[in-house]
Amino acid sequence: MEFCTTNLPFGAALTASTRLKLLRIDATPTKATLVFDDPSGIGTSLELEFLSGQFMVPASQYNVQLRAMRRQIEIKLAAARTKEAR
């Protein structure tokens, strides 16, 4: 099962926590979607935990993941825009 989100801060926290594995980043010219492997179907409950402020990860790991994911998303969005322009 896959869990998808467009919430970059949550995606970075989820990746930093290692609770779900990032499979890929899908992108259209205007939106990126983070796709995680979620065999237990816990993604939605983890997102609610994050939104309520209860999802904790080490700040240093969060920062590393946020920067890396932001860069990956920028690359994917640019590629999608280039593909659309053709």
Image (cartoon, grey):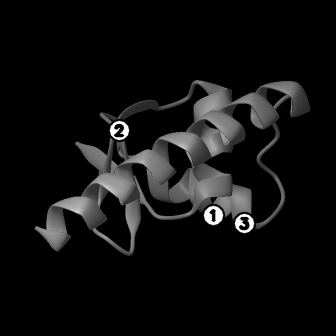
Q: Is residue 7 above or below residue 55?
A: below
Residue in view at x 31 percent, y 71 percent: 29
State the separation of the CA atoms marked 2 and 3. Answer: 18 Å
Q: Quadrant of the N terminus?
A: top left
Q: Is residue 52 above or below residue 37?
A: below
First along the sequence among labels 2 and 3: 2
Q: Does 33 sit left or right of 48 as displayed?
A: left
User: How far from the left and from the top, in percent, is residue 72?
Assistant: 48, 41
Residue in view at x 47 percent, y 64 percent: 6
Residue in view at x 58 percent, y 33 percent: 15
Other residues around mark 2 within 10 Å, as few (<14) / some (14–19) / many (≥20): some
- Residue 48 numbered mark, or none: 1
User: How far from the left and from the top, in percent, is residue 28?
Assistant: 27, 67
Residue holding disc 2? 38
Amino acid type of disc 3? Leu
Residue holding disc 3? 51
User: How far from the left and from the top, in percent, is residue 49?
Assistant: 69, 57
Q: Please tell me which residue lies in front, 50 or 27.
A: 27
Residue 18 image-quadrant placement: top right
Residue in view at x 76 percent, y 47 percent: 55
**Callout 2: SS:** loop
Amino acid type of disc 2? Asp
